[in-house]
Image (cartoon, grey):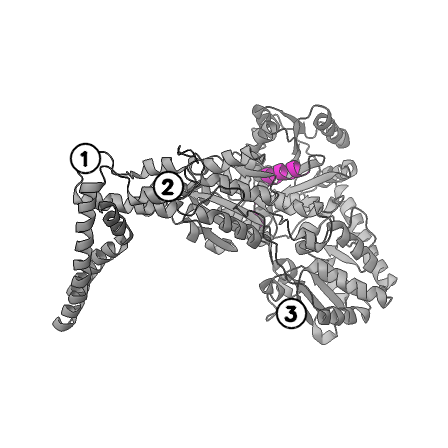
């Protein structure tokens, strides 16, 4: 009898708490608002009804606890015993935990590695992933861990093969796991970067126990609202049984539509084993043999109820678990849109395609996109992750003077490109009153119409996957025997070649030429006597690198002025061989991007193009390169200055405040991490730059070491007039 009474009391416990809560608020409301007496009495009558009912339950609970709890287990304990996954069949306590469920979903989704900085809140996930053969890559900072996951996600498209239907079953996402509190907040910047770069990143974050939220627990903050504006979706797990469906949906959301980051918050008590959670929250079965007070019974009832809610319905039975990935979803073009688009292009004389990152996304393989563009034959400008899509020397790729080409074109196709600051918010696009037409193709409605009400308006807007739409358009244009005017393509190519000759001429400029950045002497730091007075011309340096880059190279861009110069000189060798932060312009991506790229493509020769300012963000990851046998080659453009900012600040304000850095011996610093060779490149060996670069490649290949080339570069007027806002 006592067992039934106690079990009944256990399930109506929320009514008891509601009664007390209601009593307090009625009193407070009547006191503060000076309610009429009859209204207050009416509320009190309702409250008394619940109170009497609650007192009856409490009496029953106390009776049951006093008479029966000493010899039987509590209702909560019995309930959890009914969950076959919490205890083994032989009655011994099971060590299964929620971290195993997280790992199983990741394994089924084809995740090969996760990136992390270890923390107690997420240890069950890390241990379980390693047990299932998922590589756990521990980094030196949470930010670089998320950047590594970002690079992994971006490069996943290069390995896609087969039909769209089969590729939908294997979403391409990068996964980072961070601990609660500061671990999550350290991931804020890379998550924001992933959002604007449209990169499918799954961030798994630990959290304080559900019972202790808002009570001052270690590393307890409102993480979900911190990340909500930066993620496609936010998920918070409340019990063990919801881990699998939450994880499956999170992966699907990250890779569907316009890809982007998704955050899953996993409280620590949903990840650890039942018995450990029970011990930590202080839940007991009442079998101690001691008489319990009424208050203790209430507290224990609450704890037991909470424990049951955490573990009730959970299962680790392989036969009953569905951990398979949900298919990615994205809009596809309609026949009407394809016919309309093909009709516009067929009538064009000077068409132009601006290819954005979305064109490199699954389900269409990157090789298929490349061949389709070449079949179409329309001149292309590549940006974002589409850099390198057409190889090093494509006959249809145009690299310079984009603004001039846009003014002259009569049809512009925005293939996954957004009209943000990079296109002057749409102001550089041709105007409709001149007879020009714009076809915009994008997976997201917001990106499709961005700034269209201000400076531009699409003649045809297609909400669909850009690569799939491109294939549909080309199929119809081929049937109509469309060909692009070769004179138009030749005109753009000649203009391209003229700009290349200007860059070569700039590289031949005398080293003694004055620079607008040398107004002040602070950034020269004359006390660095070990630095020669002659530096390396940055364009000569980059041109030499262009000569020695192999076909299997991947370029990671992390910097301001030096990296922007590199984008004019260096030519990515193949699709998905150039990785930069994207429109958020984040510094510090180099270490994480490079590690993610090297692990995803172990046969690739990964080069990081660093500015000396950006190098400081992720230099400790050279230790990670060594520990995981992932060597890379780094070229640092060291001009002892935040030149990107100085180019604007000095001409406008006449000072280089906070722009000066040191000519630091970075090549010596990285050798302290072990497994890295540092090389100094300055005026003493500037006459043989190509030899220095080849020596770095030799060390990388033969000694399996990372190499950092610390290039002391001179100031240059190449990007004079550029601004950083």
Q: Which residue is mark 1?
A: 290
Q: Number of numbered discs present?
A: 3
Depth order, front residue of 310/692: 310
Q: Is residue 99 rendered to the left or right of residue 458?
A: left
Q: Nearer the viewer, residue 258 or 674?
A: 258
Q: Decide: few, some or many residues near mark 3? Use Cα within 10 Å; few <14, some 14-19, many ≥20.
A: many
474 and 399: which one is in front?
Answer: 474
Q: Are marks 2 and 3 in contact (CB under 8 Å)?
A: no
Give the Cα distance between marks 2 and 3.
65 Å
SS label for mark 1: loop
Q: Residue furthest front?
A: 1
> Which residue is tagged 2?
81
Which numbered disc, 2 or 1, marks the residue that appears first in the sequence? 2
Image position of 705 with respect to 181: above or below = above
Q: Nearer the viewer, mark 2 or mark 3?
A: 2
Residue plotted at (23% across, 49% down): 5
Q: Position of residue 711 (x, y in %)?
A: 66, 33
Helix, strand, or loop for circle 2? helix
Between the C-alphas of marks 2 and 1, the distance is 23 Å
Report if residue 527 lies within the magenta region. no
Main SS, magenta region, reads helix
Q: Quadrant of residue 685?
A: top right
Q: Which residues are magenta?
A: 584-601
Residue 443: percent from left, percent from top = 63, 61
Name the residue tied to disc 3.
Answer: 456
Residue closer to the observer: 63 or 250: 63
Q: Quadrant of the C terminus?
A: bottom right
| Residue 256 position in % (x across, y down) | 60, 56
Residue at the spot 74% in from the left edge and 56% down from the top edge: 381
Label 2 Cα neighbours within 10 Å, binned few <14 / some 14-19 / many ≥20: some
Residue 354 drawn at (x, y percent):
72, 59
């Amino acid at each position: 009898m006592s067992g039934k009474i106690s079990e009944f009391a256990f399930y109506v416990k929320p009514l008891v708490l509601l009664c007390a809560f209601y009593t307090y608020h009625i009193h407070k409301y009547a006191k503060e608002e000076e309610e009429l007496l009859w209204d207050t009495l009416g509320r009190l009558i309702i409250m008394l009804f619940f109170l009497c009912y609650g007192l009856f339950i409490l009496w029953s609970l106390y009776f049951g606890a006093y008479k029966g709890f000493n010899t039987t287990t509590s209702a909560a304990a019995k309930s959890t015993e009914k969950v076959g996954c919490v205890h083994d069949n032989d009655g011994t306590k099971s060590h299964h935990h929620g971290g195993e469920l997280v790992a199983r979903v990741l394994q089924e989704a084809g995740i090969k590695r996760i990136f992390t900085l270890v923390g107690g809140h997420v240890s069950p996930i890390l241990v379980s992933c390693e047990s299932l053969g998922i590589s756990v890559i521990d980094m030196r900072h949470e930010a670089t861990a998320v950047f590594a996951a970002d690079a992994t996600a971006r490069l996943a498209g290069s390995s896609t093969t087969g039909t769209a239907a089969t590729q939908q079953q294997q979403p391409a996402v990068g996964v980072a796991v961070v601990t609660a509190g500061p671990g999550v907040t350290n991931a804020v910047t890379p998550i924001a970067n992933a959002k604007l770069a449209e990169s499918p990143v799954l961030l798994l974050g630990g959290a304080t126990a559900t019972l202790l939220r808002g009570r001052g627990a270690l590393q307890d903050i409102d993480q979900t609202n911190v990340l909500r504006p930066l993620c496609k979706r936010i998920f918070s797990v409340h019990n063990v049984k919801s881990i699998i469906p939450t994880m499956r949906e999170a992966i699907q959301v990250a890779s569907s539509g316009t890809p982007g980051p998704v955050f899953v918050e996993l409280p620590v008590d949903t990840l650890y084993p039942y018995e450990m959670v029970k011990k930590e929250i202080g839940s007991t079965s009442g079998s101690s043999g001691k008489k319990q007070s009424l208050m203790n019974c209430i507290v224990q009832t609450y704890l037991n109820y909470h424990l049951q809610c955490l573990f009730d319905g959970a299962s680790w039975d392989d036969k009953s678990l569905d951990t398979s990935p949900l298919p990615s979803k994205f809009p596809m073009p309609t026949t009407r849109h394809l016919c309309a688009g093909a009709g516009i292009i067929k009538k064009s004389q000077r068409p132009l395609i601006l290819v954005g990152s979305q064109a490199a996304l699954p389900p269409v393989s990157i090789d298929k996109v490349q061949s389709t563009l070449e079949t179409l034959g329309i001149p292309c400008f590549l940006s974002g992750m589409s850099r390198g899509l057409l190889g090093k020397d494509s006959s249809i790729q145009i690299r310079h003077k984009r603004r001039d080409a846009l003014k002259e074109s009569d049809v512009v196709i925005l293939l996954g490109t957004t009209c943000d600051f990079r296109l002057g918010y749409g102001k550089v696009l041709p105007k409709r009153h001149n007879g020009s037409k714009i076809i915009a193709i994008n997976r997201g409605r917001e990106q499709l119409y961005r700034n269209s009400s201000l400076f531009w308006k699409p003649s045809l807007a297609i909400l669909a996957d850009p690569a799939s739409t491109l294939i549909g358009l080309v199929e119809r244009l081929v049937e109509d025997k469309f060909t692009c005017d070769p004179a138009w393509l030749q005109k753009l190519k000649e203009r391209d070649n003229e700009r290349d000759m200007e860059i070569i001429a700039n590289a031949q400029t005398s080293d003694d030429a004055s620079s607008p950045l040398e107004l002040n002497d602070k950034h020269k730091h004359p006390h660095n006597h070990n630095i020669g007075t002659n530096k390396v011309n940055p364009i000569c340096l980059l041109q030499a690198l262009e000569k020695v880059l192999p076909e299997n190279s991947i370029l990671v861009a992390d910097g301001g002025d030096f990296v922007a110069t590199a984008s004019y000189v260096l030519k990515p060798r193949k699709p998905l061989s150039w990785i930069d932060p994207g429109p958020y312009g984040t510094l510090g991506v180099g270490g994480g991007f490079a590690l993610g790229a090297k692990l995803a493509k172990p046969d690739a020769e990964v080069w990081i193009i660093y500015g000396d300012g950006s190098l400081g963000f992720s230099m400790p990851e050279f230790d990670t390169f060594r520990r995981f046998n992932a060597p890379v080659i780094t070229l640092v453009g060291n001009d002892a200055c935040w030149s990107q900012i100085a180019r604007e600040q000095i001409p406008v304000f006449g000072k280089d405040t906070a722009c000066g850095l040191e000519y630091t011996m970075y090549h010596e610093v990285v050798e302290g991490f072990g497994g890295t060779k540092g090389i100094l490149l300055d005026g003493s060996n500037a006459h043989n730059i190509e030899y220095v670069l080849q020596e770095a490649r030799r060390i990388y290949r033969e000694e399996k070491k990372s190499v950092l080339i610390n290039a002391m570069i001179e100031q240059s007027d190449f990007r004079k007039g550029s601004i950083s806002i």
